[in-house]
Amino acid sequence: METRRALVTGAASGIGAACAQRLAADGVHVIAVDFDQAGLEALDGVETILADLSDLDRLSDLPTDIDILVNNAGVQQVAPVEQFPPERFSYIIRLMLEAPFRLIRQTLPHMYGAGWGRVVNISSVHGLRASPFKAAYVSAKHGLEGLSKVVALEGAAHGVTSNCVNPAYVRTPLVTAQLADQAATHGLSEAEVLDKVLLEPVAVKRLIEPAEVAELVAMLCGPASASITGSSFVLDGGWTAH
Ligand code: NAD
């Protein structure tokens, strides 16, 4: 893996940071992209680029000679459809579906030229299942699933694979913020929200660690992964087994 260059989006925190550090541990040259400067500065042993990924016209400034692309940056917004702010819906689709499309589109020529490439899209259980009040997030992740499969079909002849990773709740700021919000909404403690709300449908009764997601991503980028493409890898503690 020593000669590979990876670009990881949303790499200043949570799953993206874990992926960046895990790929770097394999000897990959990692370029971590995020708009959180302090988070980027806390990373060890990776190149960093400060960028707002929702600014689609600026994405062409990012490096395109990339062998491994991890589309990870994402946000959540919870509201009933009839109250969902339309500009927030557009923002989430832009950040979590259009930016991945642009980055894939501009890095594929290098991967095709090299005859090798890996696209890993951090989707979610919400790429495969819906929950109420998450219209934009569920729409973006379902769209990402479709995009990933199209890239798998087109890339196969060029040695490029494309897959999704689909976690349930992972211990990151994106989830701990939801814990605090829901505790206030339901009048429960954060521990009760975790047990009674978030982990209620999950068989393994704990949050997933970011490093567990990163391990799966590293496997999908590793030497044994050439035939694995167009797939979605559920890492959900048994949630979707119901
Ligand atoms: P996180 O909040 O810890 O990290 C997200 C990162 O994305 C942050 O560093 C943030 O600064 C960055 N980001 C957000 N908007 C950006 C923008 N416009 N430009 C540049 N950077 C931006 O969240 P996380 O939980 O690690 O989530 C990462 C991905 O994993 C997301 O796509 C999320 O949907 C997905 N996911 C998370 C969970 C979970 O339970 N945490 C579960 C399933 C899927």
Image (cartoon, helix red, strand yellow):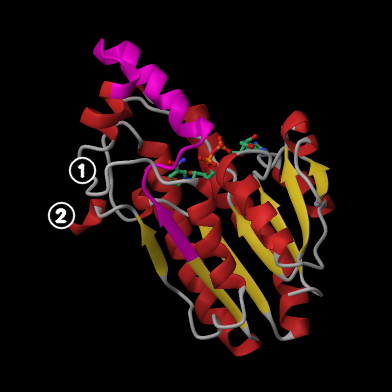
Residue at horizontal 47 percent and vertical 63 percent from the top: 164
Q: Quadrant of the N terminus?
A: bottom right
Corner quadrant of residue 105: bottom right
Residue at horizontal 42 percent and vertical 38 percent from the top: 136
Quarter of the displayed picture in which ligand 1 can be seen: top right
Kind of residue at badge 2: His
Corner quadrant of residue 53: top right
Q: How many marks?
A: 2
Count neighbours of disc 2 (C-alpha within 10 A) and say few if under 14, some if 14 to 19, many if 20 or more.
few
Visible residue check, residue 85? no
Visible residue check, residue 191? yes
Residue at horizontal 56 percent and vertical 46 percent from the top: 15
| Disc 2 and disc 1 in contact, CB within 8 angstroms | yes
Q: Which residue is mark 1?
A: 201
Tag 1 or tag 2, which sits nearer the N-term?
Answer: 1
Residue at horizontal 32 percent and vertical 56 percent from the top: 128
Verify whether residue 183 appears in magenta: yes
> Could you say where residue 20 lies in the image, as x and y percent from the top left?
68, 53
Q: Is residue 79 left or right of residue 132?
A: right
Q: Quadrant of the C terminus?
A: bottom left
> Could you say where residue 205 lies in the image, as x and y percent from the top left?
27, 42
Q: Is residue 162 left or right of residue 105?
A: left
- Residues in magenta, as a range: 164-191
> Could you say where residue 122 lies in the image, as x and y percent from the top left?
51, 54
Q: Is residue 70 left or right of residue 149?
A: right
Q: Which residue is mark 2?
A: 242
Verify whether residue 112 appears in magenta: no
Residue at mark 2 to residue at mark 1: CA–CA distance: 8 Å
Label ID, residue 109: none
> Could you say where residue 29 lies in the image, as x and y percent from the top left?
80, 63
